[in-house]
Image (spheres, rainbow, N blue to C red):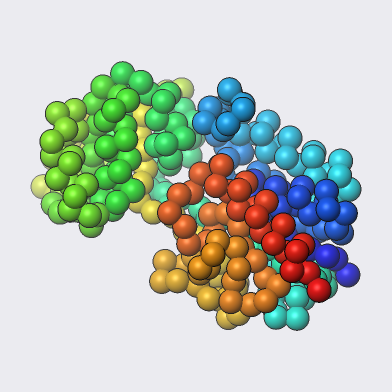
């Protein structure tokens, strides 16, 4: 019997583990692949308070080692089911616990074109607020048509030299107020009815080929590509027990409680306005503390 089982070993899950372990609780962290979550792939983190610069790998490894040094268990197993009796079934075993914290995170939706994966951290990014500062006074491209793409473009326009905003339609899905603001920006160019055909470069991103509906190809030289076409939360296995919204995120009114007593949520897998490293670790600390205080 564990006090708390945490599903997911990203920043939210590992932070929850640290707080629970420091409260002298017996903790198990279950992770399907490897520790760190999305942040492990970040070449540099420069927006985390108190740390001027650190790689995503080093940050994640520090969290992992902190959990291990406190006596926490981390197992690489895939969770396939949970129930309201706080039983967690994986591909290898079954565990019982007093509380569950779901911290499975989400995946950035990808374009699935050549060199996209290769150039992550070398010109390709999925987070303007995380990486925008690296492109000061340079030319970048944003792809997407929702609020995230629009807000990313506006944010970047205050940092970079020029933003090319590529969208496959001639109208945006995002809020009109963002669209109107974008139209006032001299350094944002709209590239509509177009999609990205190829990412070009040898070691880093050098240019992008964009193709329109008439199959005209335009080569645009940019230093960065910000992909803002949505995220895919990893909550499918919980849908039969946990309330999940239409976008696939776990519903919570106060930040950590799910609809089931004793099952909590933290990080990017829940419905929230801002998905950042700082908000992930905040969620983790709040979820663990709440679970401890409510534990029967």
Question: Residue most toward the front?
Answer: 293
Query: How far from the left and from the top, in percent, is residue 69?
Result: 86, 41
Q: Nearer the viewer, residue 147 or 227?
A: 147
Name the residue: 28% across, 53% down.
146
Query: How far from the left and from the top, in percent, is residue 150?
Result: 27, 45
Eyeballing the image, is 211 above or below 223? below
Eyeballing the image, is 180 above or below 30? above
Question: Would you identify the image quadrant in which residue 83 lies?
Answer: bottom right
- Work out whether residue 63 can be spotted: yes
Eyeballing the image, is 95 above or below 279? below
Question: Would you identify the image quadrant in which residue 115 lies?
Answer: top left
Name the residue: 42% across, 49% down.
110
Quadrant of the drawing holding the C terminus = bottom right
Instruction: Please indicate whether residue 37 sits to the left or right of residue 200 in the image.
Output: right
Quadrant of the drawing holding the N terminus = bottom right
- Work out whether residue 80 can be spotted: no
Instruction: Please indicate whether residue 94 sits to the left or right of residue 55 in the image.
Output: right
Question: Would you identify the image quadrant in which residue 267 lies?
Answer: bottom right
Name the residue: 67% across, 51% down.
285
Question: Residue most toward the top?
Answer: 137
Eyeballing the image, is 26 above or below 261? above
Name the residue: 42% across, 36% down.
129
Instruction: Please indicate whether residue 29 sits to the left or right of residue 279 in the image.
Output: right
Question: Residue most toward the left?
Answer: 214
Q: Nearer the viewer, residue 239 or 265?
A: 265
Query: How far from the left and from the top, in percent, is residue 167?
Result: 22, 47
Instruction: Please indicate whether residue 230 sits to the left or right of residue 270 in the image.
Output: left
């Amino acid at each position: 019997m564990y006090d708390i089982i945490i599903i997911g070993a990203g920043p939210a899950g590992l932070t929850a583990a640290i707080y629970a372990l420091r409260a002298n609780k017996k903790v198990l962290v279950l992770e399907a692949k490897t520790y760190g979550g999305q942040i492990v792939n970040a070449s540099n983190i420069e927006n985390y308070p108190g740390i001027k610069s650190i790689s995503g790998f080093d940050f994640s490894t520090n969290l992992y080692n902190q959990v291990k040094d406190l006596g926490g268990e981390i197992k690489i197993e895939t969770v396939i089911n949970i129930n309201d009796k706080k039983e967690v079934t994986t591909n290898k075993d079954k565990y019982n616990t007093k509380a569950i914290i779901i911290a499975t995170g989400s995946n950035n939706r990808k374009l699935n074109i050549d060199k996209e994966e290769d150039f992550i951290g070398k010109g390709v990014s999925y987070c303007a607020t995380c990486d925008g500062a690296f492109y000061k006074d340079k030319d970048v491209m944003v792809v997407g048509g929702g609020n995230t793409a629009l807000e990313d473009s506006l944010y970047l326009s205050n940092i970079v030299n020029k933003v090319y905003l590529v969208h496959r339609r001639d109208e945006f899905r995002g809020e009109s107020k963002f669209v109107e603001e974008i139209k006032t920006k001299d350094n944002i160019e709209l590239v509509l009815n177009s999609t990205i055909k190829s990412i070009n470069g040898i070691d880093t991103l050098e240019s992008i080929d964009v193709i329109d509906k008439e199959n005209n190809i335009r080569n645009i030289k940019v230093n960065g590509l910000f992909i803002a076409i949505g995220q895919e939360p990893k909550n499918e296995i919980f849908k039969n027990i946990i309330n999940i919204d239409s976008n696939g995120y776990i519903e919570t009114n106060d930040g950590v409680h799910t609809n089931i007593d004793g099952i909590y949520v933290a990080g990017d897998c829940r419905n929230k306005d801002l998905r950042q490293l700082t908000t992930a670790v905040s969620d983790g600390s709040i979820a663990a503390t709440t679970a401890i205080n409510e534990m029967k």
